[in-house]
Image (cartoon, helix red, strand yellow):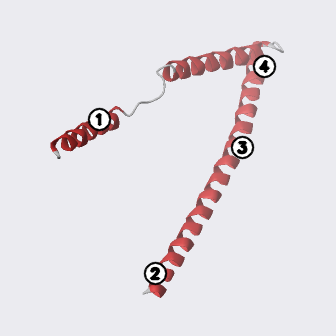
Amino acid sequence: MSALVRDEIALATAEMEQKAKSLLRGGIAIGAGAVFGLFALIYGLLAAAWGINDAIGNEWVGFLIVFGALLLLVLGAFLFAWRKLKVGAPKPTMAIDEARRIRETVVAKRGEMP
């Protein structure tokens, strides 16, 4: 019986190691994708600024337009985050109510006992 338990523990350990390695590889891939995405975004914004410059015929207006658009996006993101975060920490109201009912039940049962 103890050999069976040891084998089950070894199997569970091997399975957890395999899943942990898979999660680690996935996390590394997400990080690499985020870095490449950031570089792609930078080059895309530069291309847009240079394209606007060529269309307008001025050397810096395109960069100001892209800069202004990015500032508006930053402002919008911060306002959205501020509205969502000012609500405060979530409160487990259902769990608190359930705990209160359990406590009341236990206290009531104690009062009934001699």
Q: Is residue 55 above or below residue 101?
A: above
Residue beneath label 3, please?
Answer: 36
- For residue 54, the mark is 4
Residue at horizontal 74 percent and vertical 32 percent from the top: 42
- Viewer-proximal residue, 104 or 9? 104
Q: Position of residue 37 (x, y in %)?
A: 68, 40
Q: Position of residue 34 (x, y in %)?
A: 67, 42
| Side (left or right) of 15 relative to 55 | left
Q: Nearer the viewer, mark 4 or mark 3?
A: 3
Q: Nearer the viewer, mark 1 or mark 3?
A: 1
**Sequence-wise, which precedes: disc 4 or disc 3?**
3
Q: CA distance from mark 3 to mark 2?
A: 47 Å
**Sequence-wise, which precedes: disc 1 or disc 4?**
4
Q: CA distance from mark 1 to mark 3?
A: 51 Å
Q: CA distance from mark 2 to mark 4?
A: 73 Å
- For residue 5, the mark is 2
Residue at horizontal 78 percent and vertical 19 percent from the top: 54
- Viewer-proximal residue, 112 or 24? 112
Q: CA distance from mark 1 to mark 2?
A: 40 Å
Residue at horizontal 50 percent and vertical 76 percent from the top: 9
Q: Nearer the viewer, mark 3 or mark 2?
A: 2
| Side (left or right) of 7 relative to 106 | right
Q: Nearer the viewer, mark 2 or mark 4?
A: 2
